C-alpha cells in the first residue's frame, strides 16, 4: 500500500533582506559620530584658546600687582626732607607771630596809639624766625618791659633782644633778667628790661 503526503498549506514566503536600508543606517551613524568628533574638537580648541588667554591675563594681573607693591614700598620708604619741613614750620610760625602782633596793633585805641603803636612795630620788626612772643607787659611810661615767649632754638632769644633794643621805641632798654626752660624741644623764656631814665623816645 502506497502513502503520499500532500502539503495543503501555502508555501512559506522567502524573506529578502533590504541591504540598502542597513547601509543608510550605518552611514547615518557614521555621520553622527563625525559630527560629534568635530564638535568635540572645536570645543577642545576653544577651551585651549580660553585657557591661554586666561593664563596671559593672570600673568599681566600678577605683574601689575607686583608693580603696585613695589610702588607702595617705594612710597613708604620716602620721607620728607627734614630741613624743608623745619623751614616751612619756621615760616608759618613767623607769619603767625607777625599776625598776632599786627592784630594787637589794630586793637589799640586811637587815643593810645602814640608811643604804644611804635612799641608794637618794634616787636614785629624784631622777632626772628623760630621765635614766638606770647606775652608782654609794658607800663604806661614804657619804663619797664616784661616779655614771655618760646623758641625752637635757644640762641634766637639773644638775637631777638639785640634787635629789639635797636628799635626807637626800646632805645636804652637794658635786660637784667633772662630765664629759659626746655620742654618738648621748645625753649620757653622770660625776661625783664628797664629803660634808662632820659632814654625814652
Image (tube, helix red, strand yellow):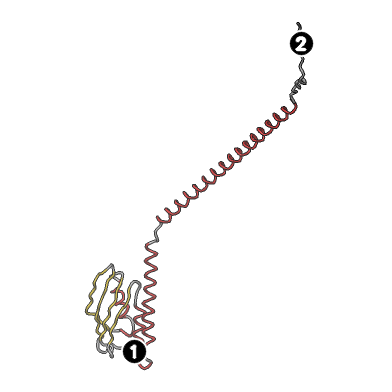
Mark number displayed over residue 115: 1
Image side of residue 101 versus residue 45, left or right:
left
Front disc: 1 or 2: 2
Confirm or deny contact between disc 1 and disc 2 (CB under 8 A): no
Q: Point out residue 55 in the picture as x, y percentages from the top left corner.
A: 53, 43
Nearer to the camera, 76 or 3: 3
Residue neighbourhood size for the residue with mark 2, other residues' Cα within 10 Å, grouped as few (<14), some (14–19), many (≥20): few
- Say what secondary structure mark 1 lies in: helix
Marks 1 and 2, how far apart at CA: 171 Å
Mark 2 — residue? 4
Nearer to the camera, 119 or 99: 99
Quarter occupied by the C terminus: bottom left
- Kindly indicate the quadrant of the structure image that contains residue 184: bottom left
Image side of residue 14 versus residue 149, left or right:
right
Q: Is residue 182 above or below residue 31?
A: below
Q: Point out residue 89 in the picture as x, y percentages from the top left corner.
A: 37, 69
- Kindly indicate the quadrant of the structure image that contains residue 122: bottom left
Q: Give the residue displayed 36% in from the left and 73% down from the top.
A: 93
Which label's residue is closer to the chain start, 1 or 2?
2
Q: Give the residue displayed 61% in from the left and 39% down from the top.
A: 43
Q: Point out residue 159 in the picture as x, y percentages from the top left corner.
A: 31, 74
Image side of residue 88 versus residue 67, left or right:
left
Q: Is residue 68 above or below residue 127?
A: above
- Say what secondary structure mark 2 lies in: loop
Q: Point out residue 13 in the picture as x, y percentages from the top left corner.
A: 76, 22
Q: Is residue 139 above or below residue 22?
A: below
Mark number displayed over residue 7: none
Q: Tell which residue pokes out farthest to the bottom in this image.
A: 111
All told, the count of numbered labels is 2
Q: Give the residue displayed 75% in from the left and 5% down from the top.
A: 1
Amino acid at each position: 500500500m502506497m502513502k503520499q503526503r500532500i502539503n495543503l498549506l501555502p508555501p512559506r514566503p522567502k524573506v529578502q533582506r533590504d541591504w540598502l536600508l542597513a547601509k543608510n543606517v550605518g552611514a547615518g551613524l557614521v555621520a553622527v559620530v563625525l559630527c560629534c568628533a568635530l564638535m568635540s574638537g572645536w570645543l577642545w580648541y576653544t577651551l585651549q584658546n580660553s585657557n591661554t588667554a586666561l593664563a596671559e591675563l593672570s600673568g599681566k594681573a600678577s605683574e601689575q600687582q607686583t608693580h603696585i607693591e613695589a610702588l607702595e614700598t617705594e612710597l613708604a620708604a620716602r620721607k620728607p626732607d627734614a630741613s624743608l619741613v623745619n623751614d616751612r614750620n619756621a615760616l608759618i610760625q613767623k607769619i603767625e607771630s607777625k599776625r598776632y602782633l599786627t592784630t594787637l596793633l589794630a586793637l589799640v585805641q586811637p587815643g593810645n596809639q602814640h608811643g604804644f603803636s611804635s612799641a608794637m612795630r618794634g616787636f614785629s620788626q624784631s622777632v626772628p624766625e623760630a621765635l614766638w612772643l606770647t606775652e608782654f607787659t609794658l607800663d604806661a611810661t614804657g619804663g619797664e618791659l616784661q616779655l614771655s615767649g618760646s623758641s625752637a632754638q635757644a640762641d634766637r632769644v639773644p638775637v631777638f633782644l639785640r634787635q629789639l633794643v635797636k628799635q626807637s621805641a626800646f632805645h636804652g632798654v637794658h635786660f637784667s633778667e633772662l630765664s629759659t626752660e626746655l620742654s618738648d624741644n621748645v625753649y620757653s623764656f622770660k625776661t625783664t628790661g628797664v629803660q634808662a631814665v632820659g632814654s625814652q623816645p
